[in-house]
Image: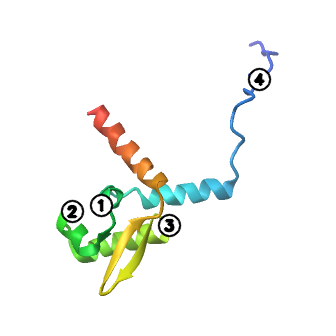
Amino acid sequence: MTLSHEAPPAVPADAPAPLDHETLDAAGELLRALAAPVRIAVVMQLRRSPRCVHELVDTLGVTQPLISQHLRVLKAAGVVRGERRGREVVYRLVDDHLAHIVVDAVEHVQEES
């Protein structure tokens, strides 16, 4: 057995710097919040326009308690925010970056089919 004395490959000058653990942990939490099929469907709906819980229930065909539970997870992760309008709360995406993550994942899966 011979040992190679080659130098490790050089890192390209434009390679991104390694990320700190805090950033990686936060990104992991965000991706976990987006990981449920119902939450993906909610994000896809909110991408089109802000919606009330009852609109999401009607569109997605799931129960109100289930939609509310998933909205709580998305809200805690900073994906959505709610704004009270009278008796209803209207939910919207915090920003478009999150919609792009979900749309890209959905489109990737559709390409594979």
Residue flagged by tag 2: what amino acid is it?
Answer: Leu
Residue visible at 58% across and 59% down?
Answer: 26
Image position, residue 86 (x, y; %): 32, 86
**How far apart, in angstroms, are the residues tagged by discs 2 and 1?**
8 Å
Residue flagged by tag 3: what amino acid is it?
Answer: Gly
Say which label, 1 or 3, has the lower sequence index: 1
* Circle 2/circle 1 CB separation < 8 Å: yes
Say which label, 2 or 1, has the lower sequence index: 1
**How far apart, in angstroms, are the residues tagged by discs 1 and 3?**
17 Å
Q: Nearer the viewer, residue 10 or 5?
A: 10
Q: How many marks?
A: 4
| Disc 4 crowd, CA 10 A, few/some/many (<14, 14-19, 20+) | few
Residue flagged by tag 4: what amino acid is it?
Answer: Pro
Residue flagged by tag 1: what amino acid is it?
Answer: Val
Residue visible at 39% across and 50% down?
Answer: 102
Q: Nearer the viewer, residue 19 or 80?
A: 80
Q: Is residue 24 visible to us here? A: yes
**How far apart, in angstroms, are the residues tagged by discs 4 and 1?**
45 Å
Kindly identify which residue carries mark 4.
Answer: 8
Kindly identify which residue carries mark 1.
Answer: 38
Which label lies toward us, 3 or 4?
Answer: 3
| Disc 1 crowd, CA 10 A, few/some/many (<14, 14-19, 20+) | some
Mark number for residue 60? 2
Secondary structure type for disc 3: loop
Q: Quadrant of residue 64?
A: bottom left
Kindly identify which residue carries mark 3.
Answer: 78
Left or right position of 33 against 59: right
Say which label, 3 or 4, has the lower sequence index: 4
Image position, residue 39 (x, y; %): 34, 61
